[in-house]
Amino acid sequence: MQLRLRTVMVCVALTSFVLACSSESTSSTPAAAAQQPVVVTPGTVPEPVATARPVPATAMNQNECVPSPSPEEIPPEVARNSSLWPLPNRDYASARANFDSNISSDTIDRLEEVWTFDLPEKTNWGAAVSNPLVIDGVVYFQDLPSNIFALDFDTGKAIWNHRGEGPSVAPNGLAVGYCKIFAAVSASEFEALDIDTGLWNHRGEGPSVAPNGLAVGYCKIFAAVSASEFEALDIDTGLTLWTAEIELTDHEGINIQPIVYDGLVYLSTAPRSEKGLYLGDGVGIIYALDQETGDIVWSFNTVDSDDIWGNREVNSGGGAWFPASIDTERGLTYWGVGNPGPWPGTEEFPNGSSRPGPNLYTDSVVALDHKTGELVWFNQVRPHDNFDLDFHVTPILTTERINGQDRDIAIGAGKTGTVHAFDADTGEELWVTAVGIHQNDDLTEVPIGESVVVYPGALGGVETFMAYAEGVVYVPVMNLPTTFTASSKKTESLDGTGILVAIEADTGDILWETEFDDLVVGSATVVNDLVITSVFGGTVYALDRANGEIVWSYQASAGLNAPLAVAGDTIIVPAGIPNRGGNKTRLIALRLAE
């Protein structure tokens, strides 16, 4: 893959009063809002305009954002908001655990809805799947139609917004750091936006099928603006600083919520475009871009074959759907990689016979040097996958005492319905635990002329983020089957069940399981003595971490298919799927009453 770089100088008129992103420390606990819910209905998303930014209660005394000649490893926005929710999974280890909140089993009954923000535009996949970010008193969020919103944390009122170029059909979301917001706004374009104004200087060139959110850092905002273009804007002026164009096939697109670290912006493509999913000649490539110039610093092809396992016209695969975890001491990034295609095969090439062999590095965890992209290790958990069982969930990084030794480990999972612990240095598998229903998933192929029901199916297993706290991993599981032949697949409905599983991180032993009569698709999030998750029908549940007992629930205004954020005394819930749970798609803020 090649990159074309162009610098665009555009004059942008700004109002005379725009507060800039600050590198100074601010309060880490957002102030409480009035207890009467505020309903914010934006209606049709307007064209972006330059406006003065209100000063949130938690962002007082900010100074002008001044880029450092040598950007810090940890973006200042991430460092000073570490007690809130500045990254997709809150921290670089992807633990999704917040012990800086007052929300607990003793207080959760005091949660009240204090504001909502309507998300009126929808795609066939709903309105929202990405994780909100909470930084300096602002909630940053991207919906599936690729619109990007900056909302006042206290009131839910829009500070600025940007209209995207098209819908997403893949996981999306924002990244924030170095005074920038990073996001895809169409399938091929990625932009960097001014964190204070949200200004764009030009639009994408085509519809999006996989935008992936924003990232903020180093006094810039970053976002994709088409399937292949990625831009950086000055955080204070809104001027375009650079546009990087990644050369892709028309069967590929940017698809991931990016993450920013050590002057680099990490993202990935996948074999998905407006033309379809896993079409021939589509591969997933992980990229690291220089945040200052947009140059590709390195790339890593997750398909270890120049001719895509011998048949470029038919085969495809790989890519990262979720952001990496980053070990800041080792300097490694850890990625879960998607499945190979076609799956299960075609009439001409049944059971994946067009792609013989294990199809590296699909269905693997890969550890890459964060500065060079060099492959340090990989572990493939599902060679030659014919059932679309991605091993895609972001690995959790932690240290456990295993067999009498302290071991740094990476815990990964995916639609395989299995959770694995790997040595963080070598990739050695230390334990594996099966979760949920398993049926016929041990087959390597389907007999010609027959059909089999497979659990977990192509939409089952561990689909979304896990959480970790105090030696325990919390795993959301979907029990949903798919019927396969040697050349076709069909998921009959989304009327499945789910479980939340607690697993000891040192042994892989299951501590408890809690069953739900709906798909557990909203990830897992720890806050003090609780673990929170949500189901497809729109209910948010809080469970006692000690025993899995449900202690609280909340019915949202629509179905849920997105992770939530816990910041201070507030939970931000994206209700993004019109279904039996309701049809009012919106962001919802739940806050502890006084």
Image (cartoon, rainbow, N blue to C red):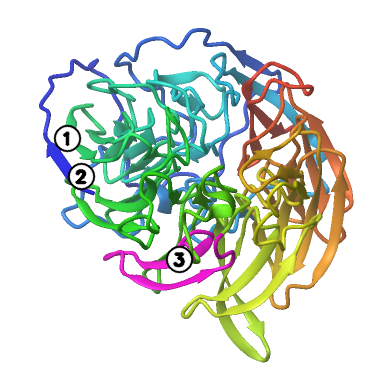
Circles 3 and 1 in contact, beta carbons < 8 Å: no
Q: Splitting the image into 4 quarters, where does residue 590 fall?
A: top right
Quadrant position of residue 237: top left
The crowding category of the residue bearing disc 1, from other C-alpha atoms within 10 Å (few below 14, some 14 to 19, many at least 20), is many
Of the image marks 1 and 2, the number of the one nearer the N terminus: 1
The percent coordinates of residue 125 (x first, y second) are 59, 26
Which residue matches tag 2?
294
Q: CA distance from mark 1 to mark 2?
A: 9 Å
- In magenta, the rendered stretch is 359-384
What residue do we see at 23% from left, 26% from top?
Answer: 238
Q: Nearer the viewer, residue 142 or 498?
A: 498
Question: Where is 67 relative to 370, above or below?
Answer: above
Q: Which residue is mark 3?
A: 366
Q: Is residue 416 left or right of residue 360?
A: right
Residue at x 27%, y 46% (from the top left corner) = 218
Q: Can you give x and y, in whole percent of width and height, for residue 201 in the image?
A: 22, 22
Q: Tag 3: residue type?
A: Val
Label 3 and label 1: CA atoms lie apart by 32 Å
Q: What residue sits right under mark 1 in the picture?
A: 241
Asked if the residue at tag 2 contacts the one at tag 1, i.e. Cβ–Cβ closer than 8 Å, the answer is yes
